Amino acid sequence: MRMILIGIVMALACATPYQQEGAHANLGADGGYSSESLTHGRHVVHASGNLFTDLDTAMAHARTRAGELCPAGYDVLDSAAGMLPIVRPGLVNGKGPSVTLFVQCRPPELELGAAAADDRWWCVGSSNAVAGFCERQKPACQARRADMEAKGWLQDPCVPRLAAACFRSATGRVVTRGCSPTVAMCQSARDTMLFQIQRDHDHDRHVLSECALAD
């Protein structure tokens, strides 16, 4: 009994450790992480702490859990995808801080070496508010990257990936496919094209599909 009381006192006097929510609730260790899988590699990650936990620690726990769910990395979805992170600093109604993130797992990168010779996808991440893109062949990726860099849009280097997220569009009778490193980037590019079509009253261009992973 004495050891249980000591455990409760220690738990109440310390910040919430990285633990699954409810794992040590019987010892008074409030908070922890929880997660829920959505579709297309998306997850909702929540982390909370007790009154001895600061907001940075809660955020770190949420990001640690997101990293476990997405071994190849992830992107935090924002208002462009209709999903804003929810951050509560704590001390509201006597509760500690909490963080809720909506994350999009990145497709696994293709290992360099013999596997890379297959040139499945070559992708560039986003930077300077310019969405990333993917091409089937490395030379095509490098040429497109060089063209954008010449216009002052600095881009990350082309890297191999096993999969990309793509949508189809048409200009007249010509159908093309626009591909990006992540579903979130693909959706952003698709939404931008829809906006341009509506703004310019362009009846010659059409978006034909939603974004979907392509291997």
Image: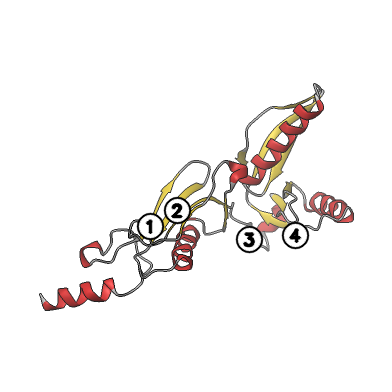
Residue contact at pointers 3 and 4, CB within 8 angstroms = no
Eye-nearest disc, 4 or 2:
2
User: Marks 1 and 2, Cα distance to the nearest angstrom?
Assistant: 21 Å
Residue 85, placed above or below residue 172: below
* Picture residue at 63% right of the left edge, 61% below the top: 111
Q: How dense is the environment of label 2, judged by Cα within 10 Å: few (below 14), some, or many (20 and up)?
A: many
Q: Quadrant of residue 46?
A: bottom left
In the orientation shown, which residue stands out farthest toward the left?
1
Q: Secondary structure at mark 4?
A: loop
Residue type, numbered disc 1: Val
User: Marks 1 and 3, Cα distance to the nearest angstrom?
Assistant: 47 Å
Label for residue 92? 1
Which residue does the numbered mark 3 point to in the structure image?
111
Q: Secondary structure at mark 2?
A: strand
User: Marks 3 and 2, Cα distance to the nearest angstrom?
Assistant: 28 Å
Q: Position of residue 41 (x, y in %)?
A: 52, 46
Residue type, numbered disc 4: Asp
Q: Quadrant of residue 204?
A: top right
Q: First in sequence: mark 1 or mark 2?
A: 2
